[in-house]
Image (cartoon, rainbow, N blue to C red):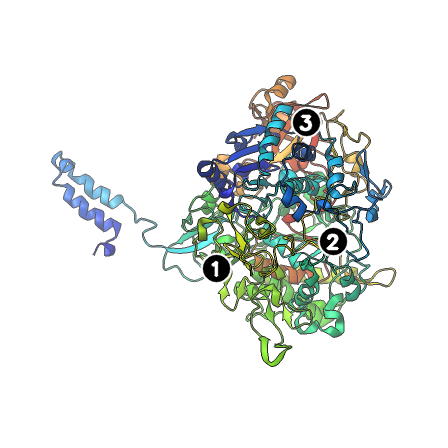
């Protein structure tokens, strides 16, 4: 989230689209309720189903899953056409005025530079015009046809209300009503917040869905203000932490990136990471990248990372493909190219797409290790459970090690919530039976692996044998020790260059913030954005002062918010060019002539002049991007693409299937179904009472929602002669499930491109272990393709067929 | 004095007083004694409270874990879970998942011991931690030694291992995650993701 849960009470308008906060984040949603009750805020919900969020909304509009970009760009088009734009904010804080190179263009669904055979673009024309001074050229009058603003107007012009209705199935009058409500928040004294989740991310153009709303929020001036923002509602208790700490194929902690093969040495790697400002006097804070990188390397390899060995640069692996994400991992497994897999607290058999493919893949592994507090389906993928897991164990050679772990109540440590708060928790109990803490298990694996390398030698052992392992008990690091590592500390004392008698950083001390980090090996830091979380003043994450200065909803003394305890990101954008808040009633910070100050830590250098340094300090431009250069694989603007499995052809680009640059593995294109064979548009989602495949192990939740069902409209039920509560078979090109049918008014057929589109809703949550009834999940049906930029699978939009079946003999 | 009285004692005392009231007058004198004998001690009368965070979604509601007092080290349990009223986000409230956390902690399908399933076998069998960890370390090393790619075909140093993957858990703490990062990345592993990917 750019903002935070409690800030939602400050808003005037909430739009829940691509998410379902009332059901998936019930206690966070209470802040929407507060805003409605105390500020008269309104709630808009746009969703394929009339969800519980919709049931308390002021306006609900249906939308076909996978058509959000058309809707969002339709709103952008409306706002520009009706001058519902926060003009000053757009001119000052976005790249609207920037001039784009002549070579860039867009036509009929494709941008310039497309290579169909490679399924990729040459993005070199997607760049600003650069002047002789080395800076991007701008036109403050917005008259130049090549300025971003004019290119944007052109780009969104096709998304008229009629086109939105045609693509999305959203009735024109509903769309216009919503657009008008949204347009009102272009006022400097009105705020809108976007609450979105996996309804937007789980598409082959998921990143662009989110881009669409970010552009809209920038145009409305709703970023960096109270009650505004892009509020990504993350899914798990520490998914934000795992993202921040970079436990992804291509990441290092703090959003640094793993080298590619082309980054032959540290110099070359850093050469691509200079982040020189693109406009005069802008901060472009990533210019400090090397300080973060070197400090990370020191945290990893301590005294083995020195200037002489490029700070252990080669101890890091280099990628030959953009990422070895989970889809690629299971593709490799399927092809017999992987031997082992360690699954820590995750249930991929049920959570990844195309279950049949996953089962074959796991069966080809030599060994699988599962670490979990619960008995998962993945750990038992080899075990026959009749039709719920129809395998022959005698044919599956995979060795499986199942390790019992502790759960949250038995652990001490920090978790990072969706609002970037790092909150410490304490343990109330001990792991049951022989269950052990993950910290102990990882330490044990490491120590044994290292001992084997020390004894036997083997492939390039130094990164393992020289891994920095400074823990008091090397067999089990303590949470506080690790938290201190992550915050960062001084390795070698640093003297003041102007006064050698003065020490500015003392060896052994914790760093107070990432501003102290250096690129010469004198500092170490596990994760630069977490610097400040555990300082010499103590564990900032354990702070429990719940006072709220100015009743702003920021709670700045509770726990620690990254970065640097800032609660609202980009908060300088809440003020105009003179440093005065656009809206005095929702002040965050203000310029007093010398520095910024207020209720939140300024997200800008404290003395940076308001008329000089712009708010988006991580960007080389200093401003937010309406047009993103070559930074996204599938386009500098979002454009409507259909899901790979769609009931209609793309009205704007009928020959383009899905996202033209999304990666599709050989063999998976053939596994996409057509509307001819699979006429109904399916989507997947969660229920309030359950958490993925985890809570079916919990008695109370199993009672509340005991069994698998699918939801269909009354119209589809009538057409297929499906009685409410009766059994149905639902199948896609990849598999089939059986379920009870819930026939509901909450889903209605939509008219898209002249065709009636029926939606089939498929909740997840059931499997073959736990307290609930055995059942299936949507991933028996989903397609094996992901987002073009980050490879998140397209779980939310695929095609199925459905028919009534007799009730099974045993349930 | 009241805090030294257990609830049972209190009700016994009260019960004795009932003899002189309506129930006693109606001839139901034996009920009080039976009633007092049937009352069990109030489970939350004396507890140890611990602040924790709900493990489910990213609202991260504050919860309070209540444990019986006086349990031996290594054998502490949780008896009750409630929302934490001091927490700014949830203010003591919980959703249907958080409200049932006790049933997660005590789920009959909590794993209690390391288990192993051999090739083609139809069942898990229980094994020791020592054996399991040694077996896993052995397999990791053998696979890494055999398949580690030090340089690509153009002689560029890549130091990469792709034949074993690691899937990390997004309900683990930041501290677990950082140690996991260190252990996994130092092997040169690149097949490495968590729930953030999906």
Secondary structure type for disc 2: loop
Q: Residue at x 61, y 54 (%)?
A: A242
Q: Please determine if labels 1 and 3 lie on a single subunit.
A: yes
Residue A736 visible (yes or no): yes
Is A713 above or below relative to A535? above
Asked if labels 3 and 2 touch by Cβ distance under 8 angstroms, the answer is: no
| Comes first in the chain, label 1 or label 3 | 3
Where does residue B187 sit, x and y in percent of width and height?
Answer: 71, 62
**Residue A321: where, in percent of width, then height?**
79, 52
Quarter of the image holding residue A162?
top right
- Chain letter for the residue marked with disc 1 in the picture: A
Above or below, B66 against A183 in this view is below
Tag shown at residue A542:
1
Give the residue at mark 3.
A161
Labelled disc at residue A339: 2
User: Which mark lies nearer to you, 2 or 3?
Assistant: 3
* Quarter assignment of residue A299: bottom right
- Asked whether disc 1 touches disc 3, contact meaning CB atoms under 8 Å apart, the reply is no
The residue nearer to you, when weighing A7 against A660, is A7
Can residue B135 be spotted in the picture? no
């Amino acid at each position: 989230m750019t903002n935070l849960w409690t800030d939602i009470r400050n808003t005037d308008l909430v739009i829940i689209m691509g998410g379902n906060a009332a059901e998936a984040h019930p206690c966070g949603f209470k802040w929407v309720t507060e805003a409605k009750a105390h500020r008269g805020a309104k709630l808009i919900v746009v969703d394929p189903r009339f969800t519980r969020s919709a049931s308390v909304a002021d306006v609900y509009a249906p939308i076909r899953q996978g058509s959000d970009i058309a809707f969002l760009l339709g709103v952008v088009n409306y706002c520009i056409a009706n001058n519902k734009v926060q003009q000053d904010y757009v001119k000052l804080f976005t790249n609207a005025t920037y001039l784009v190179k002549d070579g860039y263009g867009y036509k009929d669904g494709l941008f310039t530079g497309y290579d169909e055979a490679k399924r990729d673009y040459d993005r070199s024309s997607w760049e600003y015009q650069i002047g002789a001074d080395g800076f991007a050229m701008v036109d403050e009058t917005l008259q130049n046809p090549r300025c971003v603003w004019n290119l944007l107007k052109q780009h969104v012009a096709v998304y008229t209300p009629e086109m939105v209705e045609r693509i999305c199935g959203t009735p024109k009058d509903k769309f216009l009503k919503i657009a008008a409500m949204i347009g009102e928040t272009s006022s400097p004294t009105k705020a809108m917040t976007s609450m979105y989740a996996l309804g937007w991310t789980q598409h082959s153009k998921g990143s662009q869905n989110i881009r669409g709303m970010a552009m809209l929020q920038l145009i409305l001036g709703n970023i960096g203000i109270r009650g505004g923002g892009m509020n990504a509602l993350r899914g798990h208790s520490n998914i934000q932490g795992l993202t921040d700490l970079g436990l992804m194929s291509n990441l290092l902690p703090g959003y640094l990136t793993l080298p590619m093969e082309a980054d032959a040495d540290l110099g070359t790697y850093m050469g691509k990471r200079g982040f020189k400002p693109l406009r005069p006097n802008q901060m472009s804070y990533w210019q400090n990248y090397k300080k973060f990188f070197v400090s990370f390397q020191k945290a990893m390899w301590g005294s083995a990372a020195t200037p002489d060995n490029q700070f252990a640069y080669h101890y890091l692996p280099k990628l030959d493909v953009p990422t070895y994400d989970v889809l690629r991992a299971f593709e490799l497994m399927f092809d017999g190219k992987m031997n082992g897999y360690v699954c820590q607290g995750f249930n991929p058999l049920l959570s990844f797409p195309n279950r049949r493919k996953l089962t074959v893949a796991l069966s080809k592994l030599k060994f699988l290790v599962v670490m979990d507090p619960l008995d998962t389906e993945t750990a038992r993928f080899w075990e026959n459970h009749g039709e719920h897991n129809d395998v022959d164990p005698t044919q599956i050679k995979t060795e499986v090690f199942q390790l019992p772990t502790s759960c949250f109540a038995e652990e001490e440590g920090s978790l990072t919530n969706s609002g970037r708060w790092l909150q410490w928790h304490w343990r109330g109990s001990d792991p049951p039976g022989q269950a052990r803490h993950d910290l102990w298990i990882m330490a044990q694996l490491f120590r044994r692996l290292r001992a084997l390398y020390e004894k036997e030698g083997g492939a390039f052992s130094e990164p393992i044998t020289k891994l920095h392992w400074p823990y008091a008990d090397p067999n089990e690091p303590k949470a506080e020790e690790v938290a201190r590592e992550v915050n960062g500390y001084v390795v070698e004392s640093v003297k003041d260059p102007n006064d050698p008698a003065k020490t500015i950083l003392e060896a052994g001390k914790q760093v107070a913030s990432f501003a102290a980090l250096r690129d010469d090996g004198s500092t170490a830091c596990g994760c630069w954005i977490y610097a400040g979380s555990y300082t010499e003043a103590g564990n900032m994450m354990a702070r429990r002062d719940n006072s709220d200065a100015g009743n702003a909803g920021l709670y700045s003394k509770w726990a620690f918010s990254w970065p640097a305890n800032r609660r609202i990101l980009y908060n300088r954008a809440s003020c105009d060019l003179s440093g005065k808040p656009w809206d005095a009633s929702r002040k965050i910070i203000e310029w007093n002539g010398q520095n910024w100050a207020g209720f939140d830590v300024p997200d800008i250098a404290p003395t940076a002049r308001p008329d000089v340094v712009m708010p988006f300090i991580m960007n080389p431009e200093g401003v937010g991007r309406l047009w993103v250069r070559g930074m996204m694989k599938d386009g500098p603007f979002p454009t409507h693409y259909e899901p790979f499995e769609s009931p209609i052809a793309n009205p704007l680009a009928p020959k383009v299937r899905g996202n033209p640059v999304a990666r599709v593995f050989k063999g998976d294109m053939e596994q996409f179904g057509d509307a001819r064979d699979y006429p109904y548009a399916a989507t997947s989602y969660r229920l309030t009472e359950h958490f993925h495949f985890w809570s079916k192990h919990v008695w109370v939740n199993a009672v509340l929602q005991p069994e698998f069902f699918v939801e269909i409209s009354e119209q589809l039920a009538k057409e297929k002669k499906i009685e409410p509560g009766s059994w149905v078979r639902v199948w896609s090109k990849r598999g089939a499930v059986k379920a009870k049918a819930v026939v509901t008014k909450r889903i209605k057929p939509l008219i898209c491109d002249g065709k009636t589109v029926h939606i089939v809703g498929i909740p997840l949550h059931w499997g073959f272990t736990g307290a609930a009834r055995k059942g299936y999940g949507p991933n028996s049906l989903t397609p094996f393709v992901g987002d073009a930029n980050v490879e998140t699978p397209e779980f939310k939009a695929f095609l199925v067929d459905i028919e009534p079946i007799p009730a099974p003999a045993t349930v | 004095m009241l805090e030294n009285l257990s609830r049972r004692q209190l009700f016994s005392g009260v019960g004795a007083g009932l003899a002189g009231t309506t129930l006693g007058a109606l001839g139901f004198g034996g009920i009080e004694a039976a009633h007092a004998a049937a009352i069990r001690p109030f489970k939350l009368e004396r507890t140890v409270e611990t602040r924790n965070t709900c493990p489910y979604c990213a609202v991260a509601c504050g919860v309070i874990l209540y444990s019986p007092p006086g349990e031996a080290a290594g054998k502490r349990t949780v008896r009750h879970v409630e929302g934490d009223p001091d927490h700014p986000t949830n203010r003591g409230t919980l959703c249907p998942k958080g409200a049932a956390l006790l049933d997660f902690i005590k789920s009959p399908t909590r794993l209690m011991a390391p288990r192993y399933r051999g090739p083609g076998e139809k069942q898990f069998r229980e094994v020791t931690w020592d054996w399991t960890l040694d077996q896993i370390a052995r397999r990791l090393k053998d696979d890494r030694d055999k398949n580690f790619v030090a340089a690509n075909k153009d002689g560029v140093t890549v130091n990469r291992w792709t034949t074993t993957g690691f899937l990390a858990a997004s309900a683990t703490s930041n501290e677990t995650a950082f140690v996991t990062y260190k252990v996994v990345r130092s092997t040169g592993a690149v097949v490495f993701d968590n729930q953030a990917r999906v």
